[in-house]
Image: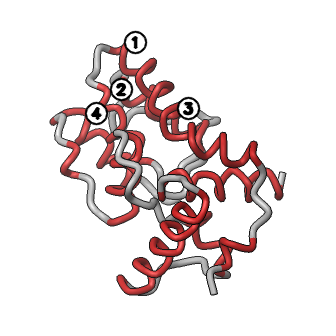
Amino acid sequence: MNPLLELALTSEDWENGRTWYTYAGDRIDSVCKRYGVDGTVGRGVFAALSPGMRVEPNLDWTSLILGGWNMGDDKPADYPVPYGWKPFTLACDIRDTGDVTLLTGIKRTAFLANLLGDFSRVTVDTWALKPFGRKTVSSPTMHRGISDAYTELGEATGHAPAHAQAAVWCHLRREIW
């Protein structure tokens, strides 16, 4: 049984899910234009920072990094560092080399693909796991099962898998706020 099929997703959830990745990409592009950085690189920096980072602080950090902030520079007091500095080192490396293939891990690479317009892949993050009562993915088989559940939801409703995942994300965040 797919618990995603039981969610009461609204038309607003679906609209937000359908447009979320494009909207995020547009916001990243505006930062990239400000600093003369390629949009793919900007999306790579944003994806590198994404684990555990809320969207607005991630955009703030992406802007700071693309603007020239480096590891070792003072951290602005109101900028969170949720899971240590490793994602920031990766983000700076992507900025410095322009090489988004430095991104590893199935979540980050799927997230980057979604930000670049490939909506056939599912970003399985903490929020994507909530309807399954999980906090982490313990195996590739579990990841595939969760990704398949979002694909099934998308097929049942006429949406791309990434848009189905984003609609659930929007729904869950709306429900808890």
CB-based contact (under 8 Å), mark 1 and mark 4: no
Q: Earlier in the sequence, mark 1 or mark 4?
A: 1
Q: Is residue 106 above or below residue 15?
A: below
Which residue is rendered at x = 68% and y = 72% of the image?
Answer: 5
Q: Nearer the viewer, mark 1 or mark 3?
A: 1
Kind of residue at disc 4 = Thr
Q: Earlier in the sequence, mark 1 or mark 3?
A: 1
Q: Position of residue 6 (x, y in %)?
A: 74, 73
Q: Earlier in the sequence, mark 3 or mark 4?
A: 4
Q: Earlier in the sequence, mark 2 or mark 1?
A: 1
Q: Nearer the viewer, mark 3 or mark 4?
A: 4
Residue 76 numbered mark, or none? 3
Residue denoted by label 1:
34
Residue denoted by label 2:
66
SS of the residue under disc 3 = loop
Q: Nearer the viewer, residue 18 or 169?
A: 18
